[in-house]
Image (cartoon, helix red, strand yellow):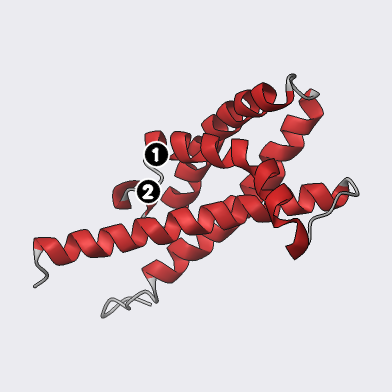
Amino acid sequence: MATHQTELRASGRRMAILVAGDIVALLVFAAIGRRSHGEDAGPGAILEVARTAAPFILGWLIAASLAGAYTPARTRGPGTMLLTTLLGWTGGLILGAVFRAILIGRFSPISFYVITFLVALVILGGWRGVFALLEAGPRRKVPGKR
């Protein structure tokens, strides 16, 4: 039987993995975006990639926290994880767009936000979906059921 302290440690470790994976996913998204626009995106450009991703990382972390994207109840199982990711990323994109506009002094065309929403959602949802599948592990067979 796990103690409360052990459960808290496991929950904290789980959340740290999710946060780290989310940040990496959004950095990958920013690198892909920079590369598609002919900008440096390799290991030598990590600071530029991080600067590109920063408004959306900040927006995601705020909105994801509000959407419960780091709580076990809202992220257990792939379906729940993906729905919570969708909700969190919707808010994250809006906040990220505002933070980015403050940094660059203007909003971008709507097409930028549509592509950002869809591509980043695929990357975030993909990584988080795999996390949920791995966490769920193999399903046990119920005796008498196929």
The residue located at (70%, 42%) in the rendering is: 52
Question: Would residue 75 appear left or right of 20 to someone viewing this image?
Answer: left
| Residue at the extreme right of the image, as rendered | 38
Q: Which residue type does callout 1 highlight?
A: Ser
Q: Which residue is mark 2?
A: 70
Q: Which residue is mark 1?
A: 65
Q: CA distance from mark 2 to mark 1?
A: 6 Å
What kind of element bears circle 2?
loop
Relative image position of residue 136 (x, y in whole percent)? 38, 68
Question: Would residue 59 appear left or right of 110 to someone viewing this image?
Answer: left
What kind of element bears circle 1?
helix
Whether pointer 2 and pointer 1 mark residues with C-beta atoms closer than 8 Å, the reply is yes
In this rendering, the answer to whether 34 lies above or below 137 is above
Relative image position of residue 91 (x, y in whole percent)? 52, 30
Q: Which residue type does callout 2 highlight?
A: Tyr
**Quadrant housing residue 84:** top left
The residue located at (47%, 64%) in the rendering is: 131
The residue located at (26%, 80%) in the rendering is: 143
**Quadrant housing residue 89:** top right
Relative image position of residue 41 (x, y in whole percent)? 79, 56
